[in-house]
């Protein structure tokens, strides 16, 4: 009797693990980690791997960009340690995968530098899209993004302060560079603003979600 129970339990565990494996395989996403630490450097990186070779190549380019910078910078003994931390978020919309990478790099100075990198990949035709592709769909998209971004951001009393407002207005002007960090989600387009773009460093970074209906954009 006990043998039968153990066999049934073992069989249940086996099929549970098998189902989990297939779910992971279907999603085609594997999370990878890089952790390095010595007397001068501390590196902690989390990033995804997909079945799409060109997407993986683009991801590695971002990771290597910051990894090379920290490893190629001569260490200054005045600082305890140099650090690099990278994490990410993933969004899905129709045939698109959007990835947002958050990187924190400290190479000395008053504070770490923070960066945001975005990737939008079309799994159907194995291609990348960016703000320029949205401009090709709608030549007025930058003006729409600018107006809506300003309206939403200025609802924040801190950002509407006269000392910051000029910086915000410049960082949300209808220029391609101001709206190149984007992600496509089921709810709409997320626009990411790095530190220093719309406010001083200590304000942090910002993002806003704009529904597709507000942009009259069909993608």
Image: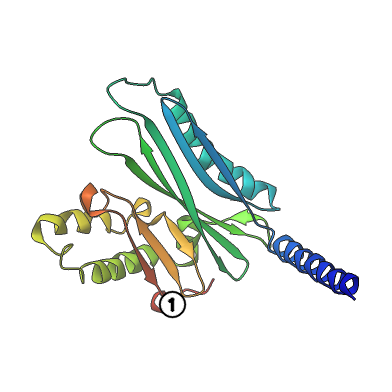
Q: Quadrant of residue 120?
A: bottom right
Image height check: is 61 above or below 107?
A: below
In this picture, residue 198 sits left or right of residue 87: left
Image quarter (top left, top right, bottom left or bottom right) of the N terminus: bottom right
Q: Secondary structure at mark 1?
A: loop
For the point 68% across and 59% down, the residue is 125
For the point 56% across and 67% down, the residue is 92
Q: Which residue is mark 1?
A: 216
Q: Nearer the viewer, residue 133 or 3?
A: 3
Q: Nearer the viewer, residue 94 or 88?
A: 88
Q: Residue furthest front?
A: 2
Q: Quadrant of residue 162?
A: bottom left
Coordinates of residue 136 in the picture (x, y in percent): 49, 61
Q: Nearer the viewer, residue 135 or 207?
A: 207
Image quarter (top left, top right, bottom left or bottom right) of the C terminus: bottom right
Q: Quadrant of residue 22?
A: bottom right
Coordinates of residue 185 in the picture (x, y in percent): 50, 69
In this picture, residue 121 sits left or right of residue 40: right
| Mark 1: few/some/many CA within 10 Å (<14, 14-19, 20+) | few
For the point 39% across and 66% down, the residue is 141
Colour scheme in the image?
rainbow
Coordinates of residue 34 in the picture (x, y in percent): 55, 40
Count all numbered tags in the image, as a single digit.
1
Coordinates of residue 145 in the picture (x, y in percent): 35, 66
For the point 25% across and 31% down, the residue is 109
Q: Residue furthest left?
A: 162
């Amino acid at each position: 009797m006990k043998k039968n129970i153990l066999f049934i339990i073992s069989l249940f565990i086996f099929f549970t693990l098998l189902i989990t494996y297939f779910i992971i395989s279907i999603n085609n996403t594997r999370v990878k980690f890089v952790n390095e630490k010595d007397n001068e450097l501390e590196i902690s990186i989390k990033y995804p791997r997909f079945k799409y070779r060109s997407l993986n190549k683009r991801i590695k380019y971002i990771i290597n960009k910051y990894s090379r910078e920290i490893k190629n910078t001569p260490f200054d003994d005045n600082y305890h340690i140099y650090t690099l931390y990278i994490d990410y978020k993933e969004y899905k919309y129709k045939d698109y995968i959007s990835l947002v990478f958050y990187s924190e790099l400290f190479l000395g100075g008053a504070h770490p530098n923070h960066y945001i990198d975005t990737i939008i990949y079309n799994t159907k035709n194995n291609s990348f899209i960016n703000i320029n592709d949205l401009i090709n769909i709608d030549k007025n998209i930058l003006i729409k993004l600018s107006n809506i971004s300003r309206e939403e951001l200025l609802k924040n009393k801190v950002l509407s302060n006269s000392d910051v407002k000029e910086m915000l207005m410049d960082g949300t002007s209808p220029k391609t560079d101001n709206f190149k960090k984007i992600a496509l989600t089921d709810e709409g387009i997320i626009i990411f603003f790095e530190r220093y773009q719309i406010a001083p460093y200590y304000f942090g970074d910002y993002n806003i979600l704009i529904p597709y209906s507000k942009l009259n954009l069909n993608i």
